[in-house]
């Protein structure tokens, strides 16, 4: 029987002319899904001077790259990006479209889905093709996982964060087709990038940190939260948190780990004063060693970590900081948690 499915699409997000890791990870996942449907993997790449980046998309598993290359596309422009993707989707009719769950993707994906009158599942932690050749999109919910499908409308759309899927094995010998897109000039765009001001991060970036210290509402109050932040600084680690910490106003959303926050893959993860809810721990991908500190010996978090400390974090954290600093002083070198 003839295959009537369209291709699988990936929107390749770029920043300052470099393709983001999450997009390469999605291309790798798309390659896997394409094998189940016997379809091509196609990528949309919008930017300025992006020709030298195309080889990475082919190496990751793309068969075809639709390239929009113009100065107006150098920075994400909501109306122009949405318009170009929607116009091409109407023409090509992709079966599936994958977009990174990033600041850009979380805005772009729903705008594209709305224009195409199709469904969208955000923050997926797994994707697979079921026996009916439909995309199953898995998300954490109700203390477990549920799958969402879009059986009728197309494309089936999903977003996933960096680190949810592994980086694909890059085959530099792979080749593919490049299709140049016409860049519209009549779409001015209500939002335009006029200037980019770079600011050095205040702490180690979560996504690339080898050591992550994450705090929950078990900190008790803002003073307890500051103790956890002090521990992260002492360990030269990235600081993360759970959603309730953000809700309390102790930390900003940008350091939240979990289903609707950041994904981390540290060598060492230390969770302090948190219960181990799936919505948070789903964001800790492949941590090599996990440690939890909680005063409740029956806390579910102890079932999910390698080492557990049963103690009030407001008592334990200051003692740990003291011990770490004493160790650093003896060895005359900071703990290289981010190395």
Image: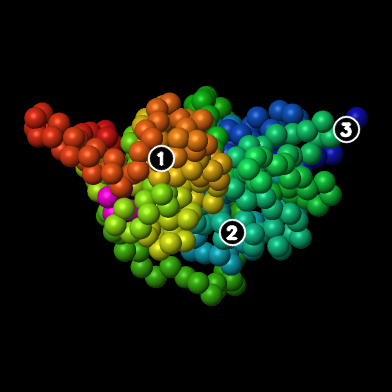
Q: Residues within 10 Å of mark 2 (few under 14, many from 20)?
A: many
Measured in 3D between alpha carbons, the distance from the residue under mark 3 to the one under mark 1, in whole angstroms, is: 57 Å
Q: Residue at x 40, y 27 (%)?
A: 307
Sooner in the amino-acid sequence: mark 3 or mark 1: 3
Sooner in the amino-acid sequence: mark 1 or mark 2: 2
Q: Eyeballing the image, is 116 above or below 265?
A: below
**Which label sits in the foreground, 2 or 3?**
2
Q: Position of residue 225 (x, y in %)?
A: 33, 53
Q: Residue at x 29, y 57 (%)?
A: 223
Secondary structure at badge 2 equals helix
Indicate the quadrant containing the N terminus: top left, top right, bottom left or bottom right: top right
Secondary structure at badge 3 equals loop
Residue position for label 1: 294
Depth order, front residue of 263/151: 263
Measured in 3D between alpha carbons, the distance from the residue under mark 1 to the one under mark 2, in whole angstroms, is: 39 Å
Q: Which residues are magenta?
A: 225-229
Residue position for label 2: 108
Q: Quadrant of residue 198?
A: bottom left
261 horizontally vs 154: left or right: left
Q: Position of residue 305 (x, y in %)?
A: 45, 30
Q: Position of residue 128 (x, y in %)?
A: 70, 34
95 horizontally vs 291: left or right: right
């Amino acid at each position: 029987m003839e295959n009537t499915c369209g291709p699988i699409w990936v929107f390749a997000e770029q920043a300052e002319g470099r393709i983001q890791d999450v997009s390469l990870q999605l291309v790798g996942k798309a390659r896997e899904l394409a094998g189940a449907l016997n379809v091509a993997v196609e990528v949309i790449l919008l930017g300025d001077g992006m020709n030298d980046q195309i080889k990475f998309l082919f190496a990751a598993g793309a068969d075809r790259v639709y390239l929009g290359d113009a100065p107006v596309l150098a920075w994400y422009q909501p109306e122009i990006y949405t318009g170009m993707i929607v116009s091409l989707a109407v023409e090509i009719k992709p079966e599936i479209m994958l977009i990174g769950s990033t600041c850009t993707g979380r805005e772009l994906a729903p705008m594209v889905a709305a224009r195409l009158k199709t469904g969208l599942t955000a923050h997926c932690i797994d994707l697979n093709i079921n026996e009916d050749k439909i995309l199953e999109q898995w998300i954490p919910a109700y203390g477990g996982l549920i799958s969402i499908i879009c059986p009728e409308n197309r494309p089936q759309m999903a977003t996933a964060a960096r680190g949810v899927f592994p980086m694909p094995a890059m085959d530099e010998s792979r080749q593919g087709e490049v299709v140049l897109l016409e860049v519209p000039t009549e779409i001015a765009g209500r939002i335009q990038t006029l200037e980019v001001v770079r600011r050095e991060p205040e702490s180690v970036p979560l996504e690339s940190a080898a050591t992550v210290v994450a705090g929950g509402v078990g900190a008790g109050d803002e003073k307890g939260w500051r103790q956890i932040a002090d521990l992260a600084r002492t360990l030269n680690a990235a600081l993360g948190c759970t959603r309730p910490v953000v809700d309390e106003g102790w930390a900003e959303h940008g350091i939240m780990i979990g289903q609707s926050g950041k994904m981390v893959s540290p060598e060492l993860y230390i969770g302090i004063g948190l219960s181990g809810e799936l919505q948070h721990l789903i964001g800790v991908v492949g941590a090599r060693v996990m440690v939890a500190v909680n005063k409740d010996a029956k806390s579910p978090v102890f079932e999910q970590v390698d080492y557990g400390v049963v103690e009030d974090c407001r008592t334990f954290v200051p003692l740990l900081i003291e011990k770490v600093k004493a160790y650093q002083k003896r060895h005359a070198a900071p703990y290289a948690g981010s190395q």
